[in-house]
Image (cartoon, rainbow, N blue to C red):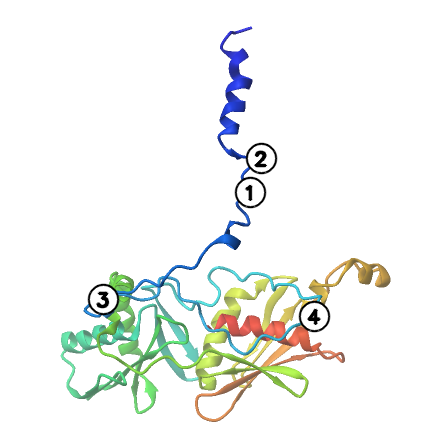
Amino acid sequence: MNSALKWMPLIAALALAGCAREGYYDNRSVDYAKAEEGAPLELPDTRNTRRYRDVMPVPDVPGAFASQGDGFNAPPPRALNAGSSVSAGEVARREAGDQHWLVVGASPGVVWSEVSDFATARGLDVRSRDDRRGVLETDQGRISVAPGLHQGESEVRCEQGGVPVEGCLNALERRFEQRSNLASATASGLAAQGKMEQQEQPPRLEQSDGGWQLMLPYDIERAWAELSAQLQADFSLEGRRQLVEQDANSHSFLVDYIPFSERSRGVWASLASMNFGEESRQVRLELSQQGTNQTLVRARATGDEALLADDERELLERIGGLLR
């Protein structure tokens, strides 16, 4: 036997002993319970406030938490790209009826600066500009920039008499595609330039007549166009959640979805019914205009059996998450 090998058990024991405390392995899973809260960090008043912001901001949750009792299960995680319209620095088209616009993955301040440079480079005859509202009036039409439905995004429109100007949209789309610094400009704080109106409140889940409904702080055309793009990306798992059809005229969607009650059905319930599979339901999502910049979303099962309140709530929570 190799003499070096016979010492290996002793060396291993000594190494492991160094990782132990009082003869046992150190279990640090409860150390947080003994942690003490320190004084908050105070920055000098002379600091540049534009350089400091939350590193990991916690988004607001729409609606209030409603306990579902002891049988509560956490909802399944959404895809990493869900709840995000476009990636930082990218640009995408949106359409709703006769209306067309761009969604840009950069903050309104950065996009507004690009739009202003675009007008100058193109030699557009600017009649008026409103930096706060993000509106540029030219002889060729109106160019407007507004906060997008998602944090850190913007919507850009080119219109003349309320009709989209495709040539202007195409030119702006090419410009944004060529500007590789849009995302970095947003992250570095340059978005503070040209302070514009703030983002609306997030989607809000509400109880109504024993059921649930989702209130969106956007007009129905914006809500339908963005929800269409998000459902096509997230509801794409056949047999679990899938977008079946959509109708721009009625502002509705038809989806196949395995409801919460099916996913959380226990073993005994499965044995009693001798059904061990998860059955999907067809659900129609109906959007309706509710005053200015307010859209209501309801979920209705297409069959004779209505959705349970918990199923309705969980599905609308997922829908609201796609638009935050």
Q: Which residue is mark 2?
A: 24
Q: Judge the density around disc 1: few (<14), some (14-19), many (≥20) Cα neighbours within 10 Å.
A: few
Q: Which residue is mark 1?
A: 27
**Label 1 or label 3, whichever comes before in sequence order:** 1
Q: Are marks 4 and 2 in contact (CB under 8 Å)?
A: no
Q: Please identify the quarter of the rendering in which residue 305 is found.
A: bottom right
Q: CA distance from mark 3 to mark 2?
A: 46 Å
Is residue 86 visible to the viewer in this orientation of the structure? Answer: yes
Q: Is residue 92 above or below residue 295?
A: above
Q: Nearer the viewer, residue 103 or 174?
A: 103
Q: CA distance from mark 4 to mark 3?
A: 47 Å
Q: Judge the density around disc 3: few (<14), some (14-19), many (≥20) Cα neighbours within 10 Å.
A: few
Q: Which residue is mark 3?
A: 44
Is residue 171 visible to the viewer in this orientation of the structure? Answer: no
Q: What amino acid is at disc 4?
A: Gly
Q: Which mark is residue 114?
A: none
Q: Which residue is mark 4?
A: 69
